């Protein structure tokens, strides 16, 4: 799923870092709205990880908030809608409109760890 997310992000004109393998073996992709003059990612950003074996994903913000979603098919629209928000602030949480529209469920760090635990 993350490989497909990399393709989707590039197709709709946004940017991502290479997929990272995190402690515990789970993988995440950092996605950003802009790329700076030195090639660094900037602007609104978030990370996304897959739940292996199912068509579900988790979005994390830099404020330590985590959101579970069960429909990867809406990923492209989610990225476009989120990055259309005008703000110079770091998104520490997803706006309630986005949470409602994409049927996200906010989850705790312990639930995140349960969902991404690799076998």
Image: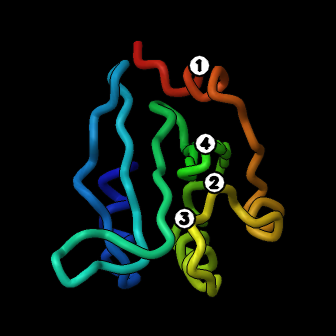
Whichever of labels 1 and 2 marks the residue nearer the N terminus, that label is 2
Looking at the image, do the residues carrying marks 4 and 1 touch, with CB atoms under 8 Å apart? no
Whichever of labels 4 and 1 marks the residue nearer the N terminus, that label is 4
Asked whether, in this view, residue 96 is left or right of residue 37, the answer is right
Residue tagged by mark 4? 64
The alpha-carbon separation of the residues under discs 1 and 3 comes to: 22 Å
List x then y, in percent, for residue 36: 27, 80
Whichever of labels 1 and 3 marks the residue nearer the N terminus, that label is 3
Q: Of the residues tagged 2 and 4, which is closer to the observer? A: 4
User: Residue drawn at (61%, 74%), measured in percent from left and top?
Assistant: 82
Check the picture and name the quadrant holding the C terminus. top left
Label 1 element class: helix
User: Residue drawn at (48%, 50%), measured in percent from left and top?
Assistant: 48
The alpha-carbon separation of the residues under discs 4 and 1 comes to: 16 Å
- Label 1 Cα crowd, 10 Å radius (few <14 / some 14-19 / many 20+): few
List x then y, in percent, for residue 42: 37, 73
Image disc number at residue 114: 1
Residue tagged by mark 3? 75
Image disc number at residue 71: 2
- Label 3 Cα crowd, 10 Å radius (few <14 / some 14-19 / many 20+): some
Quadrant hosting residue 25: top left
């Amino acid at each position: 799923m993350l490989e497909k997310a990399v393709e989707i992000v590039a197709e709709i004109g946004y940017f991502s870092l290479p997929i990272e393998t995190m402690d515990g073996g789970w993988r995440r992709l950092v996605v950003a709205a802009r790329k700076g003059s030195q090639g660094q990612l900037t602007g609104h950003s978030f990370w996304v990880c897959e739940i292996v074996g199912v068509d579900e994903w988790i979005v994390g913000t830099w404020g330590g908030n985590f959101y579970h979603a069960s429909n990867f098919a809406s990923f492209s629209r989610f990225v476009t809608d989120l990055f259309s928000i005008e703000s110079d602030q770091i998104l520490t949480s997803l706006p309630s409109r986005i949470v409602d529209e994409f049927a996200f469920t906010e989850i705790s760090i312990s639930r995140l760890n349960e969902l991404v635990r690799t076998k």
